[in-house]
Image (spheres, grey):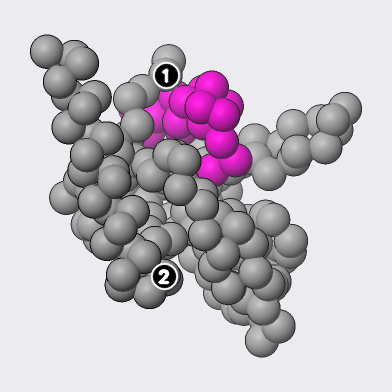
Amino acid sequence: MKRPILLHPDPRLKKLCTPVTDMTDELRSLGDDMLATMYDAPGIGLAAPQVGVLERLIVLDCVKAEGEAPRPLIMFNPEIIASSEETNVYEEGCLSIPEHFADVTRPAEVQVRWIDRDGKEHTEEMGGLWATCVQHEIDHLDGKLFIDYLKPLRRQMITRKMTKLKRELAREKS
Ligand SMILES: [Zn+2]
């Protein structure tokens, strides 16, 4: 089931999310809902706070090549346990900040640890788009958005435009 995606600025997107301690069916179906919401958007990653849930859960699938099998990942309590010194620049976007994109520099490779829906721990080295995406999503769990890496002026400009967009959307609804 698709869930509505919160748009920046929203106080829930600035919050530190709490670790998942007990795996429940509710959390498993939240993971499924988040994947459905992400694919529908369409996007390559989504974090729980973006659907208003302040727990440490992200989903991603960075397979973009035509004909390649999808690789949906549901990650509970994801953590970066090592980062490369080498960096990479990607033009990032965010489903909570639609239609705004900017270059962000991050470590090119990261080692990530997480718990899957069955409570099993995984560790994996990620590179390329996967590395960027997983770092972007984990940032969400710490209340951080990709625009927080930009110069204040640029960030304020995007926030102003988003505030205006949200006002227009609210007006359309009423
Ligand atoms: Zn995002």
Residue 174: give x, y in percent of width and height. 12, 13
Q: Indicate the quadrant containing the N terminus: top left, top right, bottom left or bottom right.
A: top left
Q: Residue placed at 58% from the left, 73% from the top?
A: 106
Residue 47: give x, y in percent of width and height. 42, 45
**As displayed, is residue 72 above or below residue 155?**
above
**As displayed, is residue 164 above or below residue 92?**
above
Name the magenta segment's main secondary structure: helix
- Which residue in the protein does label 2 denote? 150
- Which residue in the protein does label 1 denote? 2
Q: Is residue 24 magenta?
A: yes
Magenta range is 22-45
Instruction: Decide which of 137, 91 is in the foreground and name it.
Output: 91
Name the secondary structure under disc 1. loop
Residue 51: give x, y in percent of width and height. 32, 35
Q: Residue at the bottom extreme?
A: 85
Question: Which corner quadrant of the image does residue 45 belong to?
Answer: top right
Q: Is residue 3 visible?
A: yes
**As displayed, is residue 126 above or below residue 63?**
below
Q: Is residue 110 visible?
A: no
Residue 39: give x, y in percent of width and height. 57, 27
Mark 1 vs mark 2: give the one in front.
2
Q: Is mark 1 within 8 Å of ligand 1?
A: no
95 displayed left or right of 81: left
Instruction: Decide which of 4, 93 is in the foreground and name it.
Output: 93
- Neighbor class of circle 1 (other Cα within 10 Å; few <14, some 14-19, many 20+) is some
For badge 2, the amino acid type reads: Leu
Q: Is residue 5 magenta?
A: no
**As displayed, is residue 172 above or below residue 60?**
above
Q: Residue placed at 38% from the left, 74% from the top?
A: 151
- Neighbor class of circle 2 (other Cα within 10 Å; few <14, some 14-19, many 20+) is some
100 displayed left or right of 123: left
